[in-house]
Image (cartoon, helix red, strand yellow):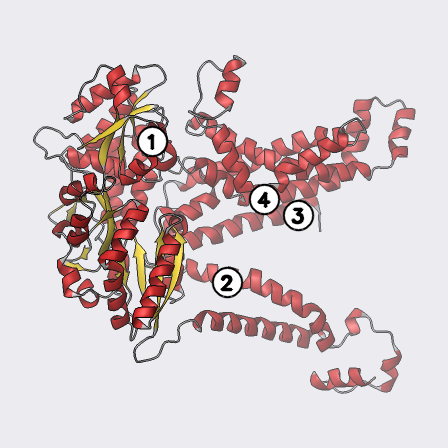
Amino acid sequence: MHRKPVRAAAIAVAALSLLALSACSASGDSSSGGKVTSIKFVAAEYSPKTAPYWDKIAKDFKAKTGITVDVQTIAWNDIHQQVSTMVQTNQLPDVLNLDSFAQYAADELLYPASEVESSSLAADFPKNLADSGSVGGKNYGIPFVGSDSVLFYNTDLFTQAGIAEPPKTIDELASDAEKISKLPGKVGFALSLSPEAPHIDYSTFMFNMGGEYMKNGKWTINSDANVKALGFLKQLTDSGATEVNPGNTGRVEGSWQLFESGTAGMVIGQTGLADRLKTSNIQYKTAAFPSSPGVTPTGLAVADYLMAFKKPGNQDAVKQFLSFAFAEKNYATFAANEGLLPVTSSSQKALASDPTLGPYIPGLETAKFAPVGEANWDKVLGEMKNSLGLAVSGTDPKKVLDQIQAVATSK
Amino acid sequence: MTTEKQTSAIAGRPVPPAGRRRRPASPQRMRPLALLIWIGPSVLLIVGIVVYPLFETVRASFQDFALTGAVKGWAGFDNFEKVLTDPDLPRVLANTGIWVVAGVAVTTLLALPLAQLLNKDFWGGRILRIALIVPWAASIVMTAIGFRWILNYYYGVLNPFLMSLHIIQKPVDWLGDERTIGWVMIATAVFISLPFTAFAILSGLKGIPDDVNEAAQIDGATRWKTYRYITFPLLRGPLMVTVLLNSIWIFNSFPIIYVLNKSNPGYQNDTTITFMYKIAFLTDRDIGAGAAMAVLNVLIVGVCVALYVRRARLD
């Protein structure tokens, strides 16, 4: 007899708490018209130096312009997930620093770069870098830092194996790797195809063997040249020229570690690896990556971008903040701090003679980008991460690439 | 009593006749508001941490999400169709079955003698008991990362150890080889769930009065017979509970598989839980499909638990 009101009350409580919860999530976004006096900047954490750097920039920026920058630095492992939650709950940042931008541009969340960068900044990007940030012919991603892959080789192991020069062709790379693998306990070429970042090693081989991700605006992931490149990696693995299972070897904890410990003769690396090797006693040199006959040697260029989200009244503040972030004094510190390459022509010139970064800067100019400006790039990348490694552990390379192509071309 | 009058007034009920006031207040006779004050906090808690997230998950499973995480609209059953027609799903379901059954079975089989051992007083028994708690108390991710290093092909300590004992002739790629990774993960799950199970059974053993065993021995039962026909049946309660809790725990155990298997490509070693994570955040980056898989996971575990509870008559 008393049960009914209890149940009704319980339902009412449930409904109220639901309302309260949804109110919580909705109340975060309450900016009104007019110009904003504070912006939210979500930054990827490259190293322990990242957060203090941005905090200082925010302080200096506030002193200069009076605009508050609310900096949120997020570790690489979590940032994609967290940003996706921000989008879901409509708590967008004003400026975001990330390795992908195309999906946000496709959802029309971003300002075109031209609306938030000053004309001098826009003119300061080399063409390949500026173009890498474009979605459907319009730039949205503003390159922020970059890297390009080169061949690192252990000179001691090369001498021990009786090899005088770094390989010039892909075939030489294979035979050199086999020679080094014959040394007891050594690995010729440390190849990383685990889900951590298999596209870096694969793309480097694929580009240098004449393959492409896209041709004339169409995905060509399972083209003959690409299948040949992935087949070559399988062969390299089967012949014992690599470590035992490249399909489950990552980079930071995997192939780089094998090189750092003196186990591996060759590895694909960027400035990040050079930075790591400073504290080891490995004798090594770097060289342009070898290529197939008739293919111009190239590296895989990877850039991280800044992007500006459309929010009422934030355009001017964002524009000022971007100019400030790219101001030479600030920007060069960031690149040097993180061991990553600067992407503006002016700072590339300024850092050209830097002993650590300088040698890698010319390579970035000729390096090729993966199609990061495609709206579904993240999906293609996800599929590559989960399946490229299968090609060296029993699955037919053609089948692996067919599957990725299918994901790329599905709606 | 004035309070009683007030509550009745608030609930819009006629004030009860004076004669009823004298009766002792049984739970059935409590006034609605008083009841609400008692159950309110737990109702709020359940709504906040169980009902609402579940509601959101179910809702997400019927929505279409952009890569950015933005909702594009309703998807009907598309997400469920996508997950259920995934060519990797049969393998993932089979993995899940093996993972749960083997994990629970091995844990229980090892925990029974272990509890028997812990039930005896011997020198160092206390230290053993404390040491056993460690794998349970330690963070699962930490334990899994520890195993990752122990089992590393190039730098791990297990390969050199087994080779020095001549158990294996050359190093084994424990985490990369299809033939070993599954068992390695099950062994890790057992390692982590063993302490809890052993202690639960131990508490069951402590609850068995000595005179029962004595009576059996006087009747001429051997030790094994005493265990088989007296002790073991009396452990039914704790065993039923540990099997249930371990099944749920191992089914939902994300960190072990995620950490140990994260460098392997494909879905060959995934269970429905890591599969759900991968399609939501790694490969398909499809939150809707991930939510659909989450709903299926809840259904799988819910149906299994309901069947088990009915059969085991735990309710």
Could you say where residue A150 lies in the image, as x and y percent from the top left?
Answer: 22, 35
Viewer-proximal residue among A51 and B207 = A51
For marks 2 and 4, the one nearer the N-term is: 2
Viewed as shown, does residue B278 lie left or right of A140? right
- Amino acid at dot 1: Ser
Q: Secondary structure at mark 2?
A: helix
Q: From the viewer's perspective, is residue A29 above or below residue A394?
A: below
The N terminus of chain A lies in quadrant? bottom right
Label placed on residue B309 = 3
Could you say where residue A382 lies in the image, as x and y percent from the top left?
Answer: 32, 45
Query: Counting other residues with Cα less than 10 Å from the Cα at mark 4, is it few (<14), some (14-19), or many (20 or more)?
Result: some
Q: Quote the CA–CA distance across marks 4 and 1.
A: 35 Å
The answer to whether marks 1 and 3 sit on the same chain is no
Viewer-proximal residue among A177 and A157 = A157
- Amino acid at dot 4: Trp
Residue annotated with mark 4:
B249
Locate residue B178: give its quadrant. Answer: top left
* Chain letter of the residue beneath label 4 in the structure image: B
Viewer-proximal residue among B227 and A179 = A179
Query: Counting other residues with Cα less than 10 Å from the Cα at mark 1, is it few (<14), some (14-19), or many (20 or more)?
Result: many
Query: Counting other residues with Cα less than 10 Å from the Cα at mark 3, is it few (<14), some (14-19), or many (20 or more)?
Result: some
* Chain letter of the residue beneath label 2 in the structure image: B
Q: Quote the CA–CA distance across marks 2 and 4.
A: 22 Å
Locate residue A221: give its quadrant. Answer: top left
- Amino acid at dot 3: Val
Label placed on residue B55 = 2
Residue annotated with mark 1:
A255
Please say whether residue A37 is visible from this viewpoint. yes
* Chain letter of the residue beneath label 3 in the structure image: B
Q: Secondary structure at mark 3?
A: helix
Cβ atoms under marks 1 and 3 closer than 8 Å: no
